Image (cartoon, rainbow, N blue to C red):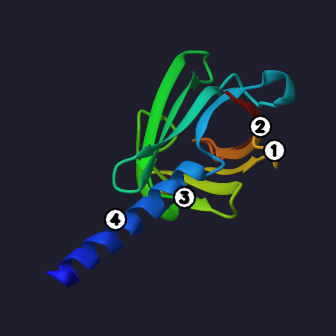
Amino acid sequence: MKTTRSMLVAATLWLTAIAVSIAASAQMGTWKLNESKSEFSSKARNHTVTYTAAPHDMVKVDVMGVDKDGKPVHWEWTGKFDGKAYKMHHNALANMASYKMVSDRTNEITMTKDGKTTVVTTVTVSEDGKSRTVTSTVTGADGEKRTDKAVYDKE
C-alpha cells in the first residue's frame, strides 16, 4: 500500500513537471504576424499561430492564414517537441511534421508530404519573449526552393 501511494505521488509530480515545462515554453501562446518586418516570396502566409498544451504531454499548434492564391487556410498539428513526426491536418504542403527543441527559445520543424520533405523551418523567440522569427525554406512541387522570413508579435 505504501509503495503504491509513493508511486502515485511520484507519477503525479512527474506529470506536473512535464505540464509546467510545456506551459513555460517560450513558444506557447498566440502569435500575430507583423507583416512590416516580414519577407515573403509569395502571397502565402500564416497570420496567427497559437501554441497550447494538449493532453498526454503534447502541444497543439493552430494556424490561420492564406495560401499562395490569397484563399483562407486553417491547419493544425498536435504532437511533442521530440523530433518525431506527427500528423498534420488541413495543410496543403504537408501531412506530417516533426518539431524539435534546439534550445529553450528555438525549435526546428520539418514538414513532409508522403515522405518527402517540403518545408524546413527554424522558429526563434526573442530574449524578451515578445516576438519570434520564423525562417522557412519551402520546396515546391516543381522542386524549386523559396525562403520566407516571418516575424510575429506575442499577443
Tell me how far mark 4 sits from mark 3, CA to CA.
14 Å
* First of labels 1, 4 by sequence position: 4
| Closer to viewer: mark 2 or mark 4 | 4
Residue 25 numbered mark, or none: none
What amino acid is labelled 2 in the image?
Ser
What amino acid is labelled 3 in the image?
Ser
Count of marks, rendered view: 4
Q: Quadrant of the N terminus?
A: bottom left
Query: Which residue corresponds to mark 4?
Result: 12
Q: Is residue 1 above or below residue 141?
A: below
Query: Which residue corresponds to mark 1?
Result: 128
* First of labels 4, 3 by sequence position: 4
Image coordinates for residue 16, horizontal then vertical, percent: 42, 60
Tell me how far mark 2 sits from mark 1, CA to CA.
8 Å
SS for callout 3: helix
Classify 10 Å Cα crowding around label 3: few (below 14), some (14-19), many (20 and above).
few
SS for callout 2: strand
109 on left or right of 79? right
Tell me if label 2 and label 1 are in contact, CB under 8 Å.
yes
Classify 10 Å Cα crowding around label 1: few (below 14), some (14-19), many (20 and above).
few
What residue do we see at 40% from left, 56% from top?
A: 57
Query: Which residue corresponds to mark 3?
Result: 21
